Amino acid sequence: MFRAALVSLVVVVVLSFVACGPPAAPRRSEIDLTTTAEKSGWLTTGRHDEAVRLCRDLARVYPASARCDRYGVTPEGRDLVYLVVSQDGVLSPEEAARRRRPVILVQAGIHAGEIEGKDAGFALLRDILDGTVAGEPLTAVTVVFVPIVNPDGHERFGPAHRVNQRGPAEMGFRTTAQNLNLNRDYVKVDAPEMAALLELFARWDPVVYVDLHTTDGAKFEHDVAVLVGPLGARPDGLERTAKALSDALQARLTAMGHLPLDFYPSFDVYDDPASGFTAGDPPARFSQAYASARDRIGVLVETHSWRVYRERAQAMRDLLLALLERAVSDAPAWRKAIDDAAVAATRLGGSDVVLVTQGQPEGRMIDFRGYAYERRPSEISGGTWIVYDERTPEVWKVPLRDVVAPAVTVKAPRGGYYVPAAHAALVAPRLEAHRVAFSRLTRPVTVDDGQVFRASKVTYAPPFEGRTRATIEGAWTPERVTLGAGALWVPIGQRGARLALHLFEPTAPDSFAAWGFFNAVFEQKEYMESYVAEEVARELLATTPGLRAEFDAWLAADAERAKSPRARLDFFYRRHPSWDSNKDRLPIVKSDVVPAEMVVE
């Protein structure tokens, strides 16, 4: 009887659904989509649960134009959510890909104390959906909005996390619960939040990647900096598209009453305004540089920390609106530029590729809107104390070094890179996260034209982001190498080629080697006792022509080294067959030849 009643109830529910259709979306008047920031007069900001609720409620109220989804979970168990908005209903990555729809990925709260992007983004997208924003900017692009990249840091809530920032009353913390700075993690991918974010990036394949921040630093009048990259010249010409967007955003923000900058306003000499500023393409560990390494347009937005929260949020909102306005006319050109860059990336083999640029020393003088300041001797620090007078605006004449030139250039192989099987488990997951294509050898292969990198000097930095970074000097040298089954093959003829160069070239600032992934190869594991080395040295000198002259030249080249008995004996140990030939040899093999199809899966 119970089963029959249950079946009858199910039938009634199904028939009701068929007759009436799915439940109607709640009325706009029934759902409060106002942020805590707006309700407080831009004095406070909401917590993570508000961001999750607003994301879901916007999708409930506007199901044809908005969608809320989860893309991961933080180490402390908080949902990583994102909102998709499109006024013509392109709300899935599959549909965006099918229609070649340009996607703009906008993220806030990667540094969770710099949080106005969250509130400004929600308010603007809500107003667009409500129809209170002129035009229909979201029929040209689909926006993927991540309100808080770092929820665990966001919920480390307090009033004193950013003492050089005016509002909100309380805010989150810069790093994750694992004390990692996510905007240094793009290449090494140590944080689960970053792995999830890169998966979202890959699924939606944005043409423009926007990262919303607040500056630290000096006091001045400029209220927002918008850095659009890449800056340096590239064979694919992507920097020209980025420059056109940058110029348009600067002009529009100026017309809106802002004082925008197109460079990061950090003094070249700490705490010295007269030293001026230098532009350039930074290493790929940073968001906008990572976007460039993935052949996308990267946009870093930095509102000025000494502006009050309301003003910073307004600047952020206006920047996002200016970007969406520009997309109405320019999004197809952005799509084409990215497509052209993808094709050009497959042709980088054999060429010199610039990975990092730097402004040239001469620079030019600019007018910069600062405040009067003076330097006072400090009885506290024993140094000088810079004191700004915000009552007295002042135009500073300072140098801007914005003509960029290559700072790090590498030679791309014509074929690609091998990674021995022993290191494949370390490297492969990160290649997958970056969508850098690779294959695995199914049987051993001998690389006759191989090149290996042997370090001649390794300098370690203090611990940074949980790793011991290494600055490596040395060179690629020819070597015939045999690799076993399970080794990785990373071809250079792919869209991920530029990022592969960042990863595998040891002198690149964000390479696997530079981040300390391979530090074990610099450790000596076997040793020769001194009394044995004394005998070996005499034997080698007696049997090796020219070794005495080489030893004498070695002694003369470095007087301090020549005083060290250990170093003198090591000179001979390194020339003995017992020396570990793998020491200082990175587990990467560079080749100009693509392996035969039969040996890769």
Image (cartoon, helix red, strand yellow):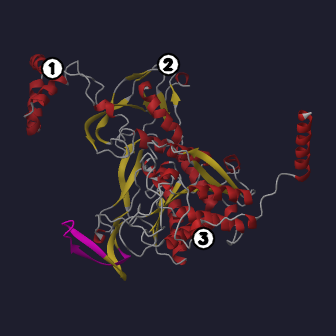
Compared across the picture, whether 322 is left or right of 85 comes to left
360 versus 132 height, above or below: above
Give amino acid for label 1: Glu
Q: Residue 458: x and y, percent?
A: 26, 39
Q: CA distance from mark 2 to mark 3?
A: 65 Å
Q: Are the residues tagged 1 and 3 within 8 Å (C-beta)?
A: no
Q: Locate residue 494, reporting x and y percent.
A: 53, 40
Query: What element does badge 3 sit on?
Result: helix
Say if residue 320 shows up in the picture.
Answer: yes
Of the numbered discs 2 and 3, the one sitting upstream in the chain is 3
Q: Amino acid at mark 2?
A: Arg
Mark 1: give few (<14), some (14-19) or many (20+) Cα within 10 Å. few
Is 413 magenta? The answer is: no
- Residue at horizontal 88%, vertical 38%? 6
Disc 3 crowd rating (10 Å Cα; few below 14, some 14-19, many 20+) is few
Which residue, as the protein is rendered here, is positioned at the far front? Answer: 1
Highlighted magenta segment, given as a residue range: 366-387
Marks 1 and 3 sit apart, C-alpha to C-alpha, by 75 Å
Name the residue tied to disc 1: 529
Element at badge 2? Answer: loop
Query: Badge 2 is on which residue?
Result: 443
Pick the quarter of the image with the C terminus. Answer: top right
Viewer-proximal residue, 490 or 528? 528
Taking the spot 12% from the left edge, 33% from the top edge, the residue there is 554
